[in-house]
């Protein structure tokens, strides 16, 4: 029976982080695997492998909508599968973790290069929710000398849109901010819109609630809406709906709601591929067919396959 | 030079009421005219008329999006136009005010009868922002024995959707509540949607911000969206855009926004007629042509005409 001391305490900060993007949280999850490895010195190789699988599953369950957490665990488990000794496991894990880290950084750089070309100079650019990929892309464009203004909304109930506004303003962009339902007032002044993603796979993109309304408004107003995310967000179709497991307490939306009122607090929703202009990845702007092709090559470790089919 | 003591103090509660519907605020504005009349005992008839015009303009300016405030003032000014003595002014005003009060109540009753037929039994019904007409219609249907569930969102930043949820729950309805951007998660379970209006005239309906996104979502999901309002919300085309004067402090949205971030706080927006299934009035469900016809018969007092053309 695998066992990791204080697993819950290590995972909780990931489960309760409502304002960070998926790529950002994945970078933090790397330290969870490092902790598990450090505490595995006196175990048998099979026990270490079991603990790593246990950690991978716990991380995936903490944020079931966030594909990079799945891929991080999957890469590590595939990497240590054939290791014979604890040292081999540690070495293979360390390589997989740093490869993943590097992949995220490289993806972000390449995406920023593509986004640079999509920003019309002197215009207003809409950005929704919080995504490190969106932030780094917009700040990259600004630092390369492109002048534009950014518009964002608060993203109730977690208000991660304020974090976005603050980071963009800190980076030298002029920012216009309003509440989510006022999108319709400000979008007509924008020329392009960007959002991140938590996962991407048939039949669409999973992102923070409100993204579907944004996509409708952009279509109505003929504003191209691009999804910025590395292929570490791509998942098999069976995993796309995992985000529906992520329902939070209604009290986070309305602390003292009266009797007779049930408060719904879901964080993610699905936006069909047909609603967006394209998915900007490290390989360029991909459409549905390219995404399907990429997903077709994905290999999933047994431990994570079983976890998925249990739901 | 007309002068009303404490005018600002009398008007401020109307200007700063962000959670009441337009019909509700109009009922309260009646007491402003009553106060002005009470304080006019020792004035000349022409001074009383000037003061009534001043009060009417101040009320309209306090909430430029809310048509019933315009009509209330307009009815009173038209009624006192030919009065010769202070007594005649007082008598004509009192009649006009009580007629307007009665008209609002009768409208609400008739609208409720029409709405009863629009609610599919046993289904979920969406309601947006806060409107006394919507509340009275839904509670009327419930009290007549129709069983259904109500769904509403909070309506940032003033949160008048919570007031709606509370009143519907108090009236015996089962209520499901969430934040505004989560409309897309809950609307697919609804069979019909209702909203109030602040004013109605070419080219559409003015209502609380978020109504346009709601109308897009309803269209996409094939859910009929009805606007519930008496004809006291109808205005001439030149008045429809008066709502754009109503911009409030950004601090109401984000108290401590950082340097470089400008916070936009507008309360109203325009929804084109083509986006809704119909406008439910005391005369039944009206389309664009019926509305134009009704507006064509409207008479506007000189004092309010001038005020309008000044902007």
Image (tube, coloured by chain):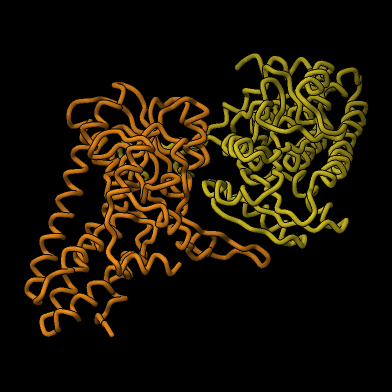
Chain colours: A yellow, B orange
Q: Position of residue A161 (x, y in %)?
A: 62, 50
> In which quadrant of the rendered image does the C terminus of chain A lie?
top right
**Picture mark count:** 0
Look at 27% across and 56% down and name the residue there. Answer: B299
Q: Indicate whether B163 appears above or below B249.
A: above
Q: Position of residue B65 (x, y in %)?
A: 39, 57
| B295 displayed left or right of B154 | left
- Considering depth in this image, is A17 or A160 the residue closer to the camera? A160
- Considering depth in this image, is A49 or B209 the residue closer to the camera? B209
> In which quadrant of the rendered image does the N terminus of chain A lie?
top right
Look at 80% across and 49% down and name the residue there. Answer: A136
| B51 displayed left or right of A96 | left
Is residue B268 something one can see in this rendering?
yes
User: Residue B89 is drawn in which quadrant?
Assistant: bottom left
| A263 displayed left or right of A222 | left
Q: Position of residue A98 (x, y in %)?
A: 89, 37
User: Residue B1 is drawn in which quadrant?
Assistant: bottom left
Is residue B171 something one can see in this rendering?
no
Q: Indicate whether B177 appears above or below A152.
A: above
Q: Position of residue A306 (x, y in %)?
A: 69, 14
- Considering depth in this image, is A76 or A21 the residue closer to the camera? A21
- Considering depth in this image, is A244 or B134 the residue closer to the camera? B134
Look at 66% across and 56% down and name the residue there. Answer: A165
């Amino acid at each position: 029976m695998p066992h990791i001391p204080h697993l819950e305490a290590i995972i909780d900060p990931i489960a309760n982080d409502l304002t960070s993007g998926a790529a950002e949280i994945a970078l933090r999850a790397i330290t969870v695997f490092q902790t598990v490895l450090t505490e595995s010195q006196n175990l048998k190789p099979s026990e270490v492998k079991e603990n790593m699988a246990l950690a991978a599953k716990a991380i995936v369950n903490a944020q079931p909508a966030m594909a990079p957490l799945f891929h991080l665990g999957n890469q590590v488990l595939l990497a240590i599968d054939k290791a014979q000794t604890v040292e081999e496991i540690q070495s293979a894990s360390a390589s997989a973790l740093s490869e993943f880290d590097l992949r995220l950084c490289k993806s972000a750089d390449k995406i920023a290069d593509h986004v640079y070309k999509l920003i019309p100079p002197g215009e207003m650019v809409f950005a929704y929710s919080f995504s490190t990929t969106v932030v780094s892309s917009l700040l990259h464009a600004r630092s390369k000398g492109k002048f534009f203004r950014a518009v964002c909304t608060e993203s109730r109930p977690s208000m991660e849109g304020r974090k976005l506004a603050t980071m963009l303003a800190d980076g030298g962009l002029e920012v216009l901010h309003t509440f989510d339902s006022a999108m319709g007032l400000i979008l007509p002044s924008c020329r392009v819109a960007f959002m991140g993603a938590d996962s991407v796979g048939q039949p669409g993109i999973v992102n923070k609630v409100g993204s579907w309304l944004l996509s409708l408004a952009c279509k109505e107003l003929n504003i191209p809406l691009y999804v910025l995310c590395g292929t570490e967000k791509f998942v098999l179709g069976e995993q796309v709906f995992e985000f529906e497991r992520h329902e939070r307490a209604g009290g986070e939306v309305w602390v003292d709601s009266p009797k007779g009122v049930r408060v719904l607090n879901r964080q993610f929703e699905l936006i069909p591929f047909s609603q967006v202009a394209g998915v900007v990845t490290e390989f360029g702007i991909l459409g549905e067919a390219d995404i399907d092709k990429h997903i077709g090559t994905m290999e999933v470790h047994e431990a994570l396959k079983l976890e998925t089919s249990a739901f």
